[in-house]
């Protein structure tokens, strides 16, 4: 029991000695009230493409006889850009015209025959059956002539398809065939050229993550970068938010269409754009870090001689004037999650406001904690005297 009592007394003495040596001190951390823009943005990647582009194909089969344009050729609507071999198409047209002439001759005969039978029938010289048969033959001849006229029109149209013209004013982006190549029109129309209407007005098709798409709206400002011009910032705006979702590798995205004016023609179809959509923008306001709005001093975090001067108000920021923590009521406005606009307050831009108070051990007395019951080292001076 006696040894236990001695041990307890020793621990108490060590604790008292250590606590007397360490004095708690607190450091006040601050941040400045700023003036500028409060913004929230969404980032994504997309591909630059023309606003309007047309795949030019052919509706008839044949051999490419002549090409009149190449890559980057500037074309006008109606301009001839290619021709297919017309030999077979001309032959088909001539054949249908000959068939039409034959049917027209037959129609003339059937008409005269019907009129003759009609006169005989009116005089009672032929039976009703013979008269109806003559009338039927006449009607059938009329129908066959109408059919052959449609066949001629179709052959003429197919012959016209052999001359391929540009449907729009624009620039040829791609050429898929060469002269002498055979193109076959079946269920899918073969593509010969791709023509972009106006390269000065481009767009970006961006894939925005499902977590961010709820914040994106038409009309929002957009900036984007392309690797081809890393020092240039391009501007645009959201023109469409498409409702159809795309799922790839279990990632759901939505397509957002962004206008991309391209007066200097720097933007080229197919470039990858790294876009920033500004979903919230409040310009030229005073704002402060959100952590300053969450701070409230307590008596436990005051150094000796410091005090708190509070004020009425639901939301406050705090400053330190000498040894006094002073509260300032503020009216919070728009926030982006990191900073908040201050609409009305005596606090001005540039003021230092408190964000938190941290305990510091730097001011503690650097005294060696010793055991008073342990023997002290010998004094070297005394030893030298001896």
Image (cartoon, helix red, strand yellow):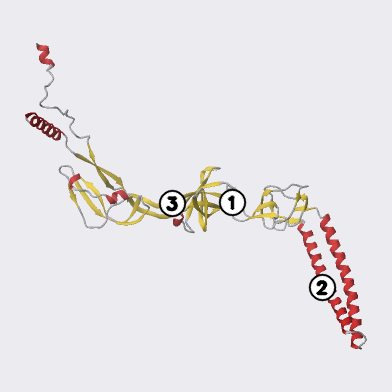
Q: Earlier in the sequence, mark 2 or mark 1?
A: 1
Percent of width and height locating residue 92? 83, 60
Q: Are marks 2 and 3 in contact (CB under 8 Å)?
A: no
Residue 193 x, y percent position in the rendering: 69, 51
Residue holding disc 3: 41
Proximity of marks 2 and 1: CB atoms separated by less than 8 Å = no
Secondary structure beneath label 1: strand
Residue identifier under label 1: 49
Whole-angstrom CA distance, mark 3 to mark 1, is 23 Å
Question: In x, y percent, where is residue 36?
Answer: 38, 51
> Crowding at label 3, few (<14), some or many (≥20) Cα neighbours within 10 Å?
some
How busy is the neighbourhood of tag 2: few (under 14 within 10 Å), some, or many (20 plus)?
some
Spatial CA span between label 2 and label 1: 51 Å
> Is label 2 or label 3 in front?
2
Single out the residue that lies furthest toward the front.
Answer: 1
Q: Which residue is label 2 attached to?
A: 143
């Amino acid at each position: 029991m006696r040894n236990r009592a001695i041990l307890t007394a020793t621990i108490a003495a060590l604790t008292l000695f250590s606590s007397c040596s360490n004095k708690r001190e607190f450091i006040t951390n601050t941040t400045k009230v700023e003036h500028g823009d409060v913004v929230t943005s969404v980032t994504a990647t997309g591909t630059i493409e023309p606003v309007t582009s047309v795949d030019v194909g052919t509706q008839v089969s044949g051999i490419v006889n002549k090409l009149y344009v190449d890559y980057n050729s500037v074309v006008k609507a109606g301009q001839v850009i290619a021709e297919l071999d017309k030999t077979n198409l001309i032959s088909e047209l001539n054949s249908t015209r000959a068939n039409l002439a034959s049917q027209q001759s037959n129609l003339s005969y059937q008409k005269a025959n019907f009129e003759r039978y009609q006169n005989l029938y009116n005089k009672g010289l032929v039976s009703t059956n013979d008269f109806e048969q003559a009338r039927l033959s006449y009607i059938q001849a009329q129908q066959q002539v109408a059919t052959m006229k449609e066949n001629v029109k179709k052959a003429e149209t197919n012959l016209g398809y052999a001359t391929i013209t540009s449907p729009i004013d624009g620039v040829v982006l791609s050429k898929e065939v060469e002269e002498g190549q055979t193109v076959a029109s079946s269920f899918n129309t073969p593509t010969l050229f791709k023509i972009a209407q106006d390269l000065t007005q481009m767009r970006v098709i961006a894939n925005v993550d499902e977590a961010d798409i709820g914040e994106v709206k038409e009309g929002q400002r957009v900036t984007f970068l392309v690797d081809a011009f890393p020092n240039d910032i391009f501007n645009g705006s959201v023109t469409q938010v498409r409702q159809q979702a795309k799922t790839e590798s279990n990632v759901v995205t939505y397509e957002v269409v962004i206008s991309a004016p391209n007066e200097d023609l720097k933007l080229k179809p197919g470039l990858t754009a790294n876009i920033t959509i500004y979903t919230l923008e409040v310009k030229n306001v005073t704002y402060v870090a959100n952590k300053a709005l969450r701070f409230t001093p307590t008596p436990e975090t005051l150094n000796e001689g410091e005090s708190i001067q509070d004020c009425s108000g639901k939301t406050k920021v705090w400053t330190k004037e000498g040894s006094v923590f002073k509260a300032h009521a503020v009216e919070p406005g728009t926030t982006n999650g990191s900073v908040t606009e201050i609409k009305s307050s005596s606090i001005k831009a540039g003021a230092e406001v408190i964000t938190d108070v941290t305990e510091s051990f730097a001011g503690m007395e650097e005294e060696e904690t010793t055991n008073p019951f342990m023997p002290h080292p010998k004094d070297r001076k005394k030893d030298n005297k001896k």
